[in-house]
Image (cartoon, coloured by chain):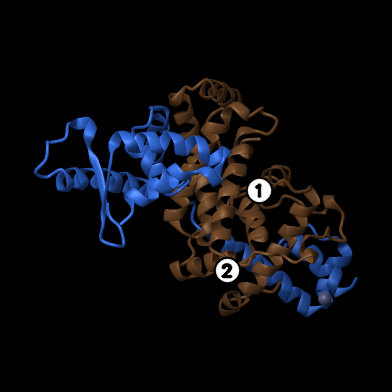
Amino acid sequence: MAKGTALQQAEIERLVERAKRGDQHAFGRLVEEYKDKIYSYVSRMLGDPYEAEDVTQEAFLRAYRSLPRFRGAASFHTWLYRIASNLAIDVVRRRRRSDNVSYSLDEPLETDDGEYDREIADDTRGPEEASGTRETQVAVRRAIMDLPGKLRDVMVLYELQGETYEDIAQILAVPLGTVKSRLFNARNQLKERLKSLVAAGEIEVEQ
Amino acid sequence: MMCRQVRQELIACWGSTDELEAAAVEHLRVCEACRIEAALLRETRVLLHSLPAEHAPSGLTKRVVARIADEQQPAGWWSRLAAWFVPEGSPAWARATAVGVAIALAAVGGTVLYHGTTSPGPDQAIIATTVAGGAQLAIGQQEIEDLMVRHQTLELTQPLADDPGVHLVMYTSY
Ligand SMILES: [Zn+2]
């Protein structure tokens, strides 16, 4: 499912077929279509715009080279994400950050899979919410970067990129339950990391 | 309902009370700690979603397509030499620098080493380097091409027998 894309799915498939046969112009249109999606994902994963640009370019290049092997079992955008995700993880590893998430975080929750509703897919925000101050944004970005890589991946894909659980499971090659438990833990950890920032503002406690 | 259970449900719905079941709502009515937790989650969500959208730098599509077109051209010896030092997947600037260094080495070598001798033709450019002992080594473009071909064959199949690769490093490093 390709959300937020201007091109229709059928058109994407036609472009992919043409690009597979070496049509660089067709591939250019696919890059144009997905560049913001892939760049913003990588940028939010790495927190560095220059590295993000390099990784984004490399992801598209690798996608082009691997197109003959793309069978269309996954949607094209999921497949692109998967390539970008692997490259971003490589960068994170090279930075020698300890991104190990303890097993307990990845264990399925006690709750049923169906428990999480997709209330966040609705991206309509009030103007006052959309305009965080610069310092606030820096603090939020830092809090996201401080999340363990596996949690950050799911947090970025679901909350910021608007991907579905199913697509994220494909992108990261993990079971659906793992996506949900990682998202749960990511939200919980982010809340803890932003606690002081939130407390500094006004907390409105509903009665 | 226990605090622990309520808090799990709160995380799942970002602290929104709209979708909570009646028992959880009733718990919130009497438990201030959980009410604060719900408020924290709502605020966290607002902060998270206050981040502005990110857009790819302008010209990215052009650069990707140019690199694809570039890759599909048969590579010159200089870019293959550069590729040997800078692995695939390195940033564009690193590859560009390596190409520049390879060309500069060829140009400097050609000028310095063949000074006073027969002026080299376009196919006889020289790469020169000073090794640790101060001795100068010289190698012609044709030799580099030969080494490159042999190196590329060996590096995957018989890396331990990849002497051409060793020679390429020796001849082209300061
Ligand atoms: Zn409670």
Kindly report which numbered mark, 2 or 1, lies closer to the viewer in this rendering: 2
Residue B81 rendering spot, x and y as whole percentages: 37, 41
Q: Which chain is brown?
A: A
Which residue is most to the left?
B116
Kindly tell me whether residue B98 is visible in this rendering: yes
Return the residue nearer the eye: B149 or B132.
B132
Residue A157 rendering spot, x and y as whole percentages: 63, 51
The quadrant of the rendered image in which ligand 1 is seen is bottom right
Q: Which image quarter is the N terminus of chain B in?
A: bottom right
Mark 1: amino acid? Ala
Image mark for residue A143: 2
Label 2 environment density (alpha carbons within 10 Å; few <14, some 14–19, many ≥20): some
* Image vertical order of residue B140 relative to residue A22, above or below: below
Residue shown at the point (53%, 68%) measured from the top left? A142
Disc on the earlier residue, 2 or 1? 1
**Left or right of B44 on screen, residue A63:** left
Mark 2: amino acid? Ala
Residue shown at the point (63%, 66%) measured from the top left? A147
Numbered disc 1: secondary structure: loop
Q: Name the residue under label 1.
A: A121
Residue shown at the point (81%, 78%) measured from the top left? B31
Q: Which chain is blue?
A: B
**Left or right of B137 on screen, residue B41:** right
